[in-house]
Image: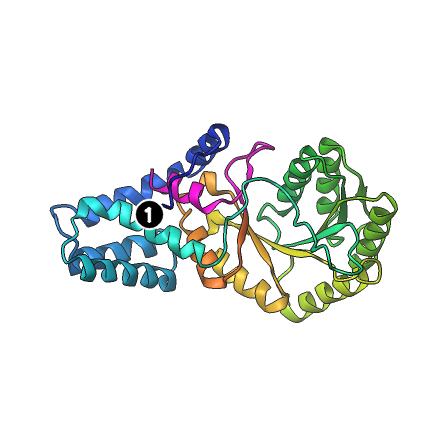
Amino acid sequence: MSFFKKIFSSEKKETLDKGLEKSKTSFFDKLGKAVAGKSKVDDAVLDNLEEVLVSSDVGVNTTLKIIERIEARVSKDKYLGTDELNSILREEIAGLLSETNSGEETEFSIPHPPADKAGYKKPYVVMVVGVNGVGKTTTIGKMAYQFKKQGYKVVLGAADTFRAAAIDQLQVWADRVGVPLVKQSMGSDPASVAFDTLTSAVTQNADIVIIDTAGRLHNKVNLMNELTKVKRVMQKVVDNTPNDVLLVLDGSTGQNAFEQAKQFTAATEVTSLAVTKLDGTAKGGVVIGISDQFKIPVKYIGVGEGIEDLQVFNKFEFVDSFFK
């Protein structure tokens, strides 16, 4: 396979390498023990590899897919040495990520509308969902910074009105990045905030609107109703919005991130994912499992606390760093 005939931007790649260091070290420590004393990939090695992948938060179903792919390689090639296992894993995981269309972009950008799409007008609207504490507000701030750096005009909307801290935190990020924030008082109707945000953005001829929403999962029906109302109200201002519903997940929570993804995909149509806090954890394998299991593209990953450390997810770069 020719997955890795790529030249990566050195600065971004160095940050990614550093951000995945804990995950990589943990994984290869386990992999080394799994193949210790073995020269051939046999059933015992595959059983051990399965355990390594599951314990690395890749997830059971995705692990089984990877093992099946490697079994097929073993059957076809008759003899595979354990020294080849690293490159085989690298190729098969990249292939798996390719099937979900995860990680095709290399920089922050918004899709250009088809030339024949009647009635399309700016702005491009991203509605951000996710439970409190996953890094949602920080992700929005870093997205705004990156989009502004690319020359886009950005407007933020503080529709998480159930926590005063959420509004205040987003204001800090808006001030830091230098973009306008539309907000109301705590306890206001989130849909009203979304309506005002889009109205303001249209008036300002903005390119991108990013709207924060409440991160509550105590009642899926209420969450569903609230997000549906926010969408419906936004569509009164700009047709067919939001263009993207971005779910933010905390990669350091491992399997809990899977559960959050299940809850939110049941409550609303999620179209993309951001996986944060990968630099402080050995659970980076969760990116592979979530991308595969939910068939939703991973768009961004957080690999550090710096404003530049939210990266557009690129599967080639990610797998190359993980198996470097």
Element class at badge 1? helix
Q: Which residues are magenta?
A: 300-324
The image quarter containing residue 255 is bottom left
Looking at the image, the residue that sits furthest to the bottom is: 221
Counting from the top left corner in percent of width and height, residue 155 is at 77, 43
Residue 175 in the figure: left or right of residue 48? right
* Mark count: 1
Looking at the image, the residue that sits furthest to the top is: 11
In front of the other: 176 or 39: 39
Residue 61 in the figure: left or right of residue 35? right
Query: Quadrant of the image for the C terminus?
Result: top left
Counting from the top left corner in percent of width and height, residue 97 is at 43, 54
Q: Crowdedness of circle 1 by 10 Å Cα count: few (<14), some, many (20+)?
A: some
In front of the other: 238 or 250: 238
In front of the other: 17 or 259: 17
Looking at the image, which residue is at 28% across and 63% down? 68
Residue 103 in the figure: left or right of residue 307? left
Looking at the image, which residue is at 16% across and 58% down? 44
User: Given the image, on which type of amino acid does mark 1 rest?
Assistant: Arg
- The reply to whether the magenta stretch includes residue 318 is yes
The image quarter containing residue 322 is top left
Judging by the rendered image, the residue that carries numbered circle 1 is 90
Q: Is residue 265 above or below residue 30?
A: below
Looking at the image, the residue that sits furthest to the front is: 116
Counting from the top left corner in percent of width and height, residue 298 is at 52, 52
Q: Is residue 57 visible?
A: no
Q: Is residue 299 visible?
A: yes
- The reply to whether the magenta stretch includes residue 41 is no
